[in-house]
Structure formats: structure tokens, C-alpha cells
Image (cartoon, helix red, strand yellow):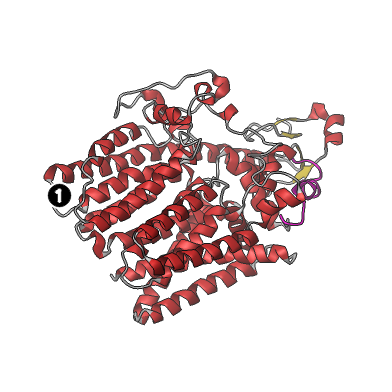
Amino acid sequence: MNGNIFKNTAFSLLTIPFVLFLLSVIGFIFHISINIYYPIISFIFGVVILFLITKKTGNSKKEFYISLSIILIVVLLSLLFGLSFYDYSYDGRGYHQASIIFLGNGWNPIYDNIYDFAANYYNNAANIDMLRWSEHYTKFVEIIQSNVYVLTGNVEIAKMTNVVFAAVLFMYSYYVLNKKTFSNINKFLKIFIPLIIVFNPIFVAQYMTFYIDSYVYILFMLMILSIIDIETNQKFDYIACLIFTISAISIANVKFGGLLYLFVTLILYFKYLFILKKKQKILLLFASSIIILISLVLSGINPYITNVCKHHRHLFHPLMGKFKIDVISNNSPMQFVDSFYLKNLFLSTFSKMDNFNYYSCKHVSLKPPFRIYRDELKFYIIGSPDVRVCGFGVLWSGIVFLSIILAFFIMGKDINERRLLMLIFHILLICTILNPYCWWARYATHLWVLPIFICITVLNKQNITKFEYVFSYIILFVMLLNVIIQMPYISKYERTYRKLLNEQISDLKGLNKPIKIYYICDFSLIENLKSGDIKLEPVNRKYYEEHKSEFSLIPIAIDRMYWDKKE
């Protein structure tokens, strides 16, 4: 199959959520709420783009229909995936789904205050503290997912986007590895390596939830792959340039940390082009940077501009500024709080996988590489979407150890090839060094690909030795095994919550009266109860205080939330 099919399909599939995001932001500016027309327009736009680029590249109609079929299959499978699993995570069921639900029900983040909107929507019954993250954080993913929610009427289906973006990364990785530049890598690895790139342990841990860390990873990888694509093309490649630009704009709107990845990549890429005196590409990157910056001003009105002009807070509130809220210290191991962050990275890498915070008073435990302890395999540790210590898996320390050894063999003869790959390594390493929370795996998801790029560099050498060849294979297969070990526990985590939720819905269906709810923080639970035809009646604080004896804690909620359901 022509490799361009995967590139064209990946690009067209990427444009659909990106256009969906842009339409929504433009709509917010003109006081237009999210509606069912945006997803339809975006999908049609993506198909038209696919048709035009297929035609321009001289490919046959058959290839257009193959690409279209792949897109339809990805969309249908992702819809089925979203419907099949429940989000069991704290942040996902809290403020991420709150953003999706409120956006889908008319909240305009540019002009509306989420606290007032939630007060009207839930009759003053919502947990205001949970909503500050929805008000002040970036919302690229939530805006896209809210469109899916409006179109389908089911908030859980909205996590279909996890599969869509993963499919884009797989197809583009496959295309790049099948270029002539990597001709020394065999066909099996050209399929296997893209799978390993996609199945980052953070993505695997979060793919059934509304966590968004894997989106930063995917978009960052698309930026890096597009640089490799551009630099290994003899002619101007507008598709690779557009993938870079779209990914750059998107990553800055996923999380505040996305800006770090964006600016480090731009600065180091500019430096690379200046050293090699590639004038045309310098002008091209400069033009792309201007487009990115202008787009960021428009797409980032909320939260960047609203944080400053509307709320009179720091640009990156609540993470920085006079009114900063420290969300890291209390959730970190005690010994990490006042310790140098690179020391924490070392400890986290070579310690037992664990998940505890400051108040547990536990300490990280160093372990030999490849050693797996039984207490690491508890489903609420290895299956958690937010592991604090050694978050890349139980075999991660062994993978890093082997990769350091293999790194000594990266001495390719082709100076240009080595320069390009060194650019990628520099981007990955600088993004790590500048990140004070790089020890926490979900805040440094890109670390996963460092061993992969080391293996790619070695495997692509002209005169590779048998030792290098076997050693690279061992690393890649240990990375796969590391993820395979993780998967059953993640599935168990989701099944445990799904069972409890379904039991609760079944139990509540026997009640004839509406159930009064107070202090709503688990917005996912509310939506799922409504989907189960359970009648709910949010009540305000005054009513709750007057009837406090009738209320009890909801056992399956993520935090304190009350109802008057009688046992």
C-alpha cells in the first residue's frame, strides 16, 4: 500500500478536530454556542481536504476511497470505544467532564463566568472549588469533546477522541519510518515501532478516561515527526508543514505546559536551520511561527487573555502569579517537595512503581532494574491514570538502563542524518530539563520515546553489528512487555467502577421519587445517573442545612457529595 495513503489519511483526520476547535472558538467570539452543525461541517471539511490532496498528489480515486474508508472505520471504532467504557478517574470525572458538560449546554468561556453558569445549571448545588480548573485552564480537548457530547447526547462517548488522535499518530509514524531515510530498518519494525510510539504507558493508563496528558504527547510527537518529514524531503512538502503548524497551535491550547514544548521546538529548529544555512526553510518556519502566534492570540482568548483581562490574574493562573494555587506539593511524595527536581527524576525512574502523596509520609524505594515487586501490581497503583513514582511502568528502570548502554553506539557516518536526529534528542532533553515536574510521568510523557529514538538511530546505521541489532530488539520488546503487564490492571480499574455504577443505577431505579443531590463535584456520575433514567434534583446549601439529617455521602463519588437516598 502506498505510504502516502497513511500520510494523507492522518492529515485529513487531524484536520477534523482542529477545524472543530476553530469553529467553536470563532463561535464563542460571536456569542454562538457549540451546536450539532460544527461536527458535521468539520467532518465534511476533512473529507474535502482528503479529496483535494489525493487529487493534487496524482493519486487514484481508489486511494481516496481507501483513505476515506480508514477514516470512517477509525471514527466508528472510536465511537464504539467511547460508549463501551466509563471514565473512572478523579480529574476526568471532575473538572474535565464539567467543562465538556457546561460547554455542551451553552457555557461561553470567553464571556460567561462558569460559577454563575453552574449555579443556574445545578441550582447552586455545585462544588465551586472543582470548577476553578474549568474556568482558568486551556480547553482544546474539552471543546472538541463537548461537540461530540452535543452530537450524541452521551458524555462518555466524547472520549472517542482518544482513539482518533492515537490513530493519527500511528499512521504518521508509520509513514515517516517508511521513508528512504530509514531504509535500513526492516519492514516488521516499521510497523512495530509506531505501535510502541503510540502505546506510551501514559496513553494506555488514560485512554479510558478524560485525562489529557496523552494529547500533549501525541501532538508533540506529530511536531517532531513533521520536522523529520520536512527535513528528509527534497521538495517543499505543504502537508508536513501544515501538520507541524496544526500540532503547534493545538498543543499550546491543550495544557499550559504545551507552550514549553512549542517554544523549545521552534527555537532549536531555528538554530538547526541557521547552522545548516537553509534559507528557504528558515523563511518557511518564520512564516509558520507568525501564523502560530496569531492563531494562539485568537484561539487562546480563553484562558490566556481572560485570565489577565477578565479575572485580573496571571496569564497562567492558577499555576503562577500572586494568587497561585500549589497543586503539586500536596500530591507529591514528601521527599520530592523540597528536593532538586532532576534528583527526583532519577529516584522516580529507578524506584518501585507507587502512587502516594505528601500526607502518606511514605518514601520512594529504589529497586534493581527489571525487578518486579508484588505490591507494584496492585490495580490502584499500576492501573492508575496518575501514577506519581515510576509512572512509565514496572520495567521502565530496566529500559532506561539498557538505553543508556545502547546510546554509546549512536555514531552514524552520515553527518546530516546524525544532525537531524541530534536535533530531536536535544528537543526532548531540553524539554525535560526545563520541566520542574519531569519526575512525574504524565507531566513528561515525551520521555517514553527517548529509548525508541535511540533504537531507531542504531537500527538505521549502515554497518550495524549483531550486538547492536539484538540489543535494540530487546529494548523494544521489553517496552512492549512493560505495557502488556499494565493493561489488565487498567481494565480491572475500569471494570470495578463500572460494576459499582451499574449496581447503583439498578438499585436507584426502584425509587419513585427524585433524589436530591448537594455539593456536586462528580459531574460524570450525575450524567451517568441521568442516562440511567434516574431522576435527580439538585438542592442548594440552605435546603441541605435544613434537612442535613436526611442526607448521606454518595459512596461511589470521587469526593464529598451528598444525596437523600435512603438505604
User: Quarter of the image holding residue 346?
Assistant: top left
Is residue 513 visible to the viewer in this orientation of the structure? no
- Identify the residue at image location x=81%, y=40%: 539
Residue 453: % across, % down:
31, 48
SS state under label 1: loop
- Looking at this rendering, what residue extends furthest in the top direction? 361
The C terminus: image quadrant? top right
Q: Is residue 360 left or right of residue 534?
A: left
82 lies above or below 49: above
Instruction: Give the magenta-colored segment's residue range.
Output: 109-127
Q: Is residue 123 magenta?
A: yes
Residue 238: % across, % down:
42, 71
The N terminus: image quadrant? bottom left
Viewer-side residue, 287 vs 165: 287
User: Quarter of the image holding residue 326?
Assistant: top right
Q: Is residue 424 left or right of residue 92?
A: left
- Identify the residue at image location x=60%, y=63%: 294
Viewer-side residue, 74 vs 262: 262
Viewer-side residue, 551 vs 396: 396
Residue 234: % across, % down:
31, 70
Give the labeled residue for mark 1: 464
Viewer-side residue, 525 vs 203: 203
The residue type indicated by label 1 comes to Ile
Is residue 515 visible to the viewer in this orientation of the structure? yes
Q: Is residue 178 magenta?
A: no
- Identify the residue at image location x=31%, y=41%: 479
Residue 545: % across, % down:
84, 30
How busy is the neighbourhood of tag 1: few (under 14 within 10 Å), some, or many (20 plus)? Answer: some
115 lies above or below 349: below
- Identify the residue at image location x=77%, y=54%: 112
Q: Is residue 157 left or right of residue 237?
A: right
